[in-house]
Amino acid sequence: MYLRENRIKFIKIKNVVFTVFGIFFVASSLYVLISLVTYYHDNLKTVLEAKATPECVVSIIIGIILLLIAGISSRLIGNANFYSGYFEGDLSGYIQYRDLAEVMGKSSGIVRLQLHIFRKIYMKGYELTKINHTEQIVLNSKICICECRYCGASIEKRVYYTGICPYCDNSDLYARVLTDNRFYSIESHVSEGINHPDFYTTQKLAQKRMRFLLYLILGISVIVIATFFCIDNVSHYHNKEYLTELLLSGNSPYSSFALIKAEIMDNILFGAVFALAFIPVTIQRGKKIKYIDTADNCSQYFAKCKTPFVDAANLTILTGNSVKNLKSVRGALRLRYLLNCTLEKHENTLKVALARKIVKDKCPSCGGAIVGAVDEHYRCRYCDNIIMGVIRKK
């Protein structure tokens, strides 16, 4: 609802194209430069004056720029998804920067800057307006009511965030929201997650962990092998006995020490580049394993909870460090290893909302599609039920 879906799809395709071309430009240009340095390392002036050198440098710069654009854009799309989910779960229509900053784990200035940019590129449906000399996020005009599904009682919004009906002590509460001509319900499905940790994690989480662990081991192995390969060639580079023996052997394709050293230098440079290329990939695999472990630990904890809201401070049970825990939880949420839960700020307290399900454009009575809901007294065209009958936000 708050995302520009079609534009984001186009940007994702663009990111894939930029990544492919970026890798191609960097890899091909590095190959040419390494070859030049290898064979003319004793005469760097020749390398600098070579026609291919400036072309390769420009290609590498372009490739790096394309990769950065794709990477930053993908990260920003993830943040936009995070913001959109938070907006849909809000019932007041007014959000302060400091609350959203705490949920995102960023400074208020960064959140403000991102929302100004996102409004023009990734998102819609909100304004950044000053209220009482303080700039706030104002969502599109919103009507909402909170009810207990068990006894049907209407409850205040703040009661909804406690997850307990004051009349029947039931936690099966839901909110009905009308905003920007769109209707949706925010429902609680906590019962589905009790004693079912898989409800809060992506499918095949264990297989993902094993796959990333294999990638991590493979990456470390490649780095170690490439490092030893470079060390071995460095030792041969200044070893006159080795060079002489290789030159005088009958099967040697080399006719001089210079050609042998050029080949050795070629091996050193390629080995070093190969090792360096695998370092960020290996680090990323390690981070993903950490996020998977966080998702697994959180899901085990959430499966024991019977209320739809948990204080984020309780996440200290995982490692004893709430700051690191929240950072890991945010990473698991962005990568969608952790599902059916969100971080939210209620009553000045950071909470984890469990088993929240947003059902869009459906009548809560018959499930029929809602079309053209523009006021607070919309009547369902299928079951004739009045969906909204509430007071507009003040």
Image (tube, rainbow, N blue to C red):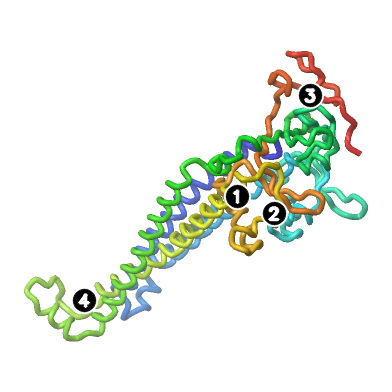
Disc 1 secondary structure class: helix
Q: Which residue is mark 4?
A: 260
Percent position of residue 323, x then y:
66, 62
Is tag 1's residue or tag 3's residue first in the polypeptide sequence? 1
Percent position of residue 8, x then y:
61, 41
Disc 3 secondary structure class: loop
Disc 4 secondary structure class: helix
Number of the label disc, if any, that sits on residue 337: none
The residues bearing labels 3 and 4 have C-alpha atoms spaced at a distance of 78 Å
Q: Which residue is mark 2?
A: 312
Query: In terms of depth relative to the viewer, which is nearer, 2 or 100?
Result: 100
Residue at 73% from the left image edge and 24% from the top image edge? 364
Disc 2 secondary structure class: helix
Is tag 2's residue or tag 3's residue first in the polypeptide sequence? 2
Number of the label disc, if any, that sits on residue 301: 1
Task: Single out the mark in the foreground, 2 or 3.
Answer: 2
Q: Which residue is mark 3?
A: 373
The residues bearing labels 2 and 3 have C-alpha atoms spaced at a distance of 36 Å
Question: Could you tell me which quadrant the C terminus lies in?
Answer: top right
Query: In terms of depth relative to the viewer, which is nearer, 202 or 190?
Result: 190
